[in-house]
Amino acid sequence: MQITISNQQKLIKLKNSTIKRLAVFFVTQIEQHTPFHYSNLNILFVDYKKIRNYKLAFFNKNESTDVITIPHSASPSNSELSADIIISVETAIREANKRNISYEEEIGLYLAHAIDHLAGSNDNTPSKRKTMLTREKLWLKKAKQQFLIASQN
């Protein structure tokens, strides 16, 4: 799997190698139960304004969010599936402070959530949302146990 990272924000410095290891770890967790069909992931880290612009462009909603997942269909010239994961670092910092966790942990949760969506999970009902969050928090706990992510501010 090819993972490309684009850091388009200036609030925090991110380590690409850490993000890539975390993404691979979450895909490995998914693959224990469900095939993961994406061979290319583009992970973009943006600020509040940029994620709002992406939300307007892709979903016609003028509002901010924490993470956006955009799967791309295979084409006749390229059978590999790719996807964009767009993460709002500003939102991650704000939410981490509210919940008294590290921003790395919050970003990890957003990344797990995006990969869960790419594997076919849906959070369009409260029950499905709860199931996804429970699964993603378990992955996050395992990632922290393997020192893939910081667990405190």
Image (tube, rainbow, N blue to C red):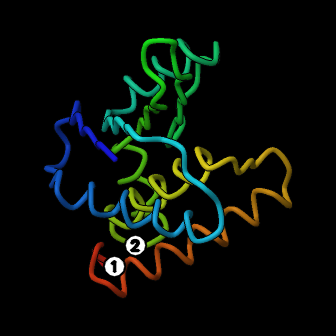
Element carrying mark 2 = loop
The amino acid marked with disc number 2 is Ile
Residue 132, position as x, y percentages in the image: 69, 62
Residue 31, position as x, y percentages in the image: 55, 64
The quarter of the picture where residue 153 lies is bottom left
- Looking at the image, which residue is at 46% across and 33% down? 83
Q: Is residue 36 left or right of residue 53?
A: right
The quarter of the picture where residue 60 lies is top right
Determine whether 7 is above or below 100 in the image: above
Element carrying mark 1 = loop
Of the image marks 1 and 2, the number of the one nearer the N terminus: 2
Residue position for label 1: 151
Q: Nearer the viewer, residue 145 or 61?
A: 145
- Looking at the image, which residue is at 29% across and 42% down? 2
Q: Nearer the viewer, residue 20 or 50?
A: 20
Residue position for label 2: 101
Q: CA distance from mark 1 to mark 2?
A: 7 Å
| Nearer mark to the viewer, of 1 and 2 | 1
Circle 1 packing at 10 Å, graded few (<14), some (14-19), many (20+), is some
The quarter of the picture where residue 51 lies is top left
